[in-house]
Image: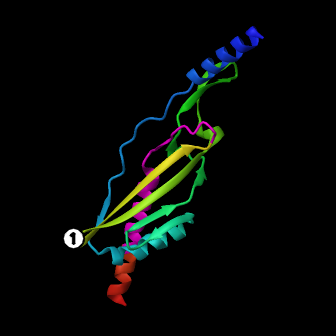
């Protein structure tokens, strides 16, 4: 019995020490558009709908949009740390994301700044396992989403000007 407890303890310590947490990435810069929240909001909703993001909260009055949990395995977007694994008899670092995936919630805010609107996207990725280890966003998804909103806003503004 003592040997079993000792073996379990040693394995637990050995396995947990192989984990390396995610890196720290800079927060994506906000996007400022020279228009009111009312004029920017349709572009925001269009892009979120087009990207098929599952919505949890849509509050136009407060300029807040939040998504439901969505699962992702894309290493280009999320860093959930890594662990050591034996591959072909050699130790290699393997991303946690490959085996566990990440659950991600996005919060998008549209805040009036005088005659302009400032858009921010923040991601809260977490490892989907029971461990609940944090992941880090590499910022790519947020930047791409903001750029898509900017482009849609320009398209809608152009339609209004020519319509």
- Front-most of residues 135 and 25: 135
Does residue 151 belong to the magenta stretch? yes
Q: How many marks?
A: 1
Q: Residue furthest front?
A: 1
Kindly indicate the quadrant of the structure image that contains residue 12: top right
Which quadrant: the N terminus?
top right
Kindly indicate the quadrant of the structure image that contains residue 149: bottom left
> Image point 40% across, 37% down: which residue?
24
Q: Is residue 120 above or below residue 154?
A: above
Q: Which residues are magenta?
A: 129-153
> Image point 21% across, 70% down: which residue?
114
Q: Residue furthest bottom?
A: 163
Residue placed under numbered mark 1 in the picture: 114
Which quadrant: the C terminus?
bottom left
Q: Position of residue 27 (x, y in %)?
A: 36, 47
* Neighbour tally class for label 1: few under 14, some 14-19, many 20 plus, Cα within 10 Å: few
Q: Residue furthest top?
A: 3
> Image point 65% across, 38% down: which residue?
99
């Amino acid at each position: 019995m003592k040997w079993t407890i000792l073996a379990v303890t040693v394995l637990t310590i050995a396995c947990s020490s192989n984990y390396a947490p995610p890196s720290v990435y800079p927060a994506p810069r906000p996007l400022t558009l020279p228009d009111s929240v009312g004029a920017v909001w349709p572009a925001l909703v269009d892009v979120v709908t087009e990207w098929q993001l599952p919505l949890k909260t849509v509050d136009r009055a407060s300029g807040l949009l939040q998504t439901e949990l969505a699962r992702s395995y894309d290493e280009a977007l999320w860093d959930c740390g890594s662990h050591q694994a034996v591959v072909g008899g050699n130790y290699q670092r393997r991303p946690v994301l490959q085996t566990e995936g990440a659950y991600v919630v996005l919060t998008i805010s549209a805040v009036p700044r005088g005659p302009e609107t400032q858009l921010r996207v923040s991601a809260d990725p977490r490892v989907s396992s029971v461990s609940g280890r944090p992941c880090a966003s590499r910022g790519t998804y947020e930047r791409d989403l903001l750029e898509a909103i900017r482009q849609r806003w320009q398209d809608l503004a152009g339609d209004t000007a020519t319509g």
